[in-house]
Image: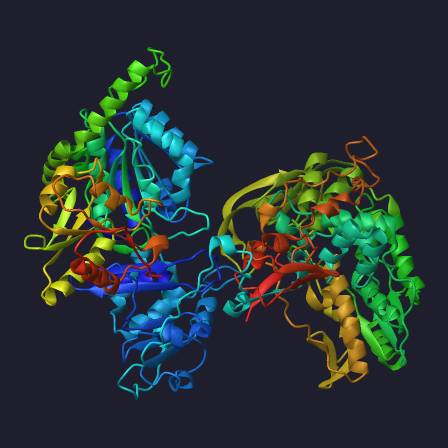
Amino acid sequence: MTGAKIIAATFARLGRHVQTFGDYAAERAGAPVRAYTRVGDAPIENRNKVYRPDHLVILDAALLDEEATAGLAAGGFILVNTPQPPEALAHRFPAFRLATVDATAIARSHDIGTRAVVIVNTTIAGAFARLLDLPLAALTAAYGDLGFSRDLPSARAAHEAVALGPAPVDSAAPAPPPRPRMSVLSLLAHREGRPTGTRTGSWRTQTPRYVTVTAPCSGACPAGNDVVGFVQAVATAGEEAAAEILGRTTPLSAVCGRVCPAPCMGSCSRAALDGAVDVRGLERHVASRASVAVRERGATPTPRRIAIVGGGPAGLSAAYELAKSGHAPTLFDAEGALGGVLHTGIPAFRLPRAPLAREIADVVALGVTTRLGKALSRREIGELPRAFDAVILALGLQKPRDLPVSGRELSGIEQGLAFLHRRNVEGGARIAGRVVVLGGGNTAIDCARSALRAGASGVTLAYRRSRAEMPAIADEVEAAEREGVAFAFLRAPVAFSGNGRVAGVVLAEVEPGPLDASGRPSPVTTDRRATLACDAVLLALGQSADDSVLPEGWTMRDGRVHAAGAPLPVFAAGDLATGEGTVAAAIGDGRRCARRAIAVLEGREEEAAPPERTVKPSEIRFHHFDRRPPTPHVPPASAAAIALAEEDAGLPDGSEAARCLSCGRCTRCDTCLVYCPDGVIARDGAGYVIDLDYCKGCGLCAAECPRGAMEMGA
Amino acid sequence: MSEELVSGNHAAALAATLAARANRGGRGFGSGVYPITPQTECVELLCRLPIEKGHVVRVESEHSAMAVCMGFSFAGARTFTASSSNGLAYMAENVFSAGLYRLPIVMMAVNRTLGPPWNIWAEHGDTLMLRDAGWIQLYCEDNQEVADTILAAYRLAEDRRILLPALVCQDAFFLSHAMARTSLPEQAAVDAFLPPLDLPHRLLPDVPRTIGGLDWPRENEVHRRELHEALARVEEVYGEVQAAFAKSFGRALADPIVPYRLDDAEIVLVSMGTTAATVRAAVDEARSRGIRAGALRVRLFRPFPERRLAAALAGRKIGVLDRDLCPGLGGILWAELRGVPGISPAQGYVAGLGGGDIRPEHVAGILDDLRARSKATEPVFVEVG
């Protein structure tokens, strides 16, 4: 109908008189309909249907038959929406001129229609305009008149793409077949008649199917966790089942359930409704009820001995993956305990040591040899390939970024990580007076909050960007604020003042400049400066890889060490390889690196995961869900404003999981079954079955699927 | 004056909106609407168009739609609604109320076959069912006529000598869904043509009254006579409305009955709505064969323009083509025409029931049948489906 309207509107724009109307019945979307357009030089009085058309446009190639072409004037165009060339159809209709265009593909590439059904009429009208040589200006104006200007590029593409077949070979059109008279049963005789079956499935051009599409949370998880899977398991099968799913990709759920910035929550579809699902809280909840790490070593016919240097999240993850698969990892760490930054950097009020120790113990118990308490020299690292089948370097980012400005040499200025190490590992480190923390990441927040607990009389955190751009977890920033940390945003340190000992930080005002590579406004330092008086400064400006740990002649390329131009069985994992800087990213990379090392040793192709499509927010049907705000966490046991024990007591139970929309995963909610206008969807075992004899492909099921777990396709 | 490519449904909604806005200097506009195929496009557009001092209320049924219109109308607002077929049947009680209350409500009806069994296509039986409701009834042939007739209906309905509701009818799909270039007047011209409504019996907050209470037999016989007399004055006022319409919009408003090649016609076929276009084509074809055929289209059905019809039809052999049926009698237009004095008995033809497409060849057959007849008999059913 819309296609007929566009043609009419285009002719109207050319000053012609037009009339256009549809020949409707009681059908709904998906049923074949006819529409007519008359064009004339005088007002059109004839209101009969069109029985002798000059041209014919077929939107669905399955409808192209003798009945459709009946009455068509000899030499008329038949424009068919099909990927086939006109030559493939021309022999069936020798009296007419065939033209074809794949309007469905063009419309789909222009995103016209719903996710369920491609709408082709605004596209194919462009092809028809080409056949009739209608000026593009008139077509453009007509699209404007009808409010379809957004579809004009697709129409223009069809205008370009339409293929015209050979000239007709017959000069006479075939006589239309006689129209059969419908036999009519008296209303009183209805019991004699049988309902005539119409296999409406033959109308279908698109077929619905059930699909599993990656949920945005899972797609966003740097650790590669099946986020929607474990959350749904909490909701439907319990914490043990959820732990089993998490254990496939991570041994550190108690850790991530506390310290992860949770990109899963940042991409959670539910955020647009009433707040993201508290995935972090749920992961912690699962880890509090069940051990996440698997307890049974896998078996492999060719166990490999792998050295892993660095017992942080990446090294632990690599070791876990290897031990899980039956290999023999040995973990080296300079500290006396495993955990890396989890042990040395993150304060206990955020990550209590008991669950951390338990999860590390679970990894080690799987069959990991540990060599702790001694830093390996470059030479020792260089010798590892001789003693092991492969080496994974998971050293993290060990070189803290410094601030080479005037006054840096003053005492009282310390790297934040060193301060945290003193406090977390050596225990009882104190700091006095007014403390300034420089930086905006989680280390900066940890420094600020630890300083408050270590005796500081006041803490100010200065950051060169705005609050919204802080990489730190927002909840942590809020906690710091609650505890009394002051913030100075858009302030960059340009010098330190003091006599022997630091007495102040000179901060320049920063203005947001043009967007930089990270998509954030680049900080532009101005001349406007002020000095912030202080007694101590903690630098938390980020870290970089320490190249000096690599033995002579080793160079890193694409996460693998090369020497003398040849690749060694030495790989880099975690921050050293990626610089991502989160526990979750380190876990994901540690696992991938372990698999890569094994694949290389076994002479297999390295696995390249195909990019996965994730469910878009526009695919979620929010009207199917009731509003229910996130579950509040249990109030802290301690009433102290600044607690030394873990402040966040976590979720009270797993009920938060019921808020998960299960994006991209069928939950057998029956919406498809309920919405099917033809009642052709039935429950079938664990899913549904669609009766394709009668599914006319209207797409309502896919359009109404609350979670994007259905799609329409050819 | 702007020209737009619109359907009959949209022509009605746009004209109603122009009339609605024209009452912004008065008591504004109010409407209750409920959708039904094939009228839905009309009320959808009405709901979308901005109307100063206007309220369009989406109600739960046609019965309530008319009730809301009556409330608005009693409050002095200009009103509009639209319906079709079984929607009109459900609305019927309040359709009668609106007539009996003498409220100048304008309603657009898309003529659709009453069910069950269900059928959504054109037939006139739904609005003809309401022929005794005290409403003015007008039937249109094309998009332009829909827009023009809606505007004219307000002027007629709101005339102090009339004060009756008006029903403007168009055929399902053939007209309601057919797009054609349609001229729509500027708001200023409509403002001049339709001055603010001043309803003499509008409800006043400081004069509490019960309306529609008990009507004693003596009161009722007077009220009914008044209603009849008011409806009977429509034809006379219609001429004035035509003159005002032409002055305001520079275009003629079609006559209550529209003759075609009637001057020397021996046989004439009478019809309503879009069928008339097909009849004209058949008349031309018959004339090309030397048959002195003519056609007459009835636009104004209530009041029934008896004297005009008598003048136009006297001395000719008459056939009536009804797209409707009064079971047990025949076509309703034919039945009405039989009572017109001074014309020969008309032959009735019933065709296009259930929305069948009455094509020129069907009408040619009817004209041949009519020409061959020596006298009128019982109605002839012409099956076109």
Question: How many numbered discs?
Answer: 0
**Of A523 and A264, which appears nearest the observer?**
A264
Residue B81 image position (x, y, % from top left): 34, 37
In this rendering, position of residue B37 left or right of residue A526:
left
Res A177 → quadrant: bottom left
Rendered view: B32 above or below A117: above
Q: Is residue A13 visible?
A: no
Give the position of the C terminus of chain B as an image quadrant. bottom left
In the rendered image, the residue lying farthest to the bottom is A169
Which residue is found at the position 83% from the left and 56% from the top? A241
Rendered view: A164 above or below A266: below
Rendered view: A569 above or below B296: below
In this rendering, position of residue A689 left or right of residue B3:
right
In the rendered image, the residue lying farthest to the left is B264
Residue B293 image position (x, y, % from top left): 12, 58
Q: Is residue A239 visible?
A: yes
Which residue is found at the position 41% from the left and 63% from the top? A33
**Of A520 and B207, which appears nearest the observer?**
B207
Residue A354 image position (x, y, % from top left): 89, 49
Residue B153 image position (x, y, % from top left): 22, 36
In this rendering, position of residue A270 left or right of residue A78:
right
**How does the figure colour the protein chain or chains?**
rainbow
Which residue is found at the position 89% from the left and 81% from the top? A302
Res A55 → quadrant: bottom left
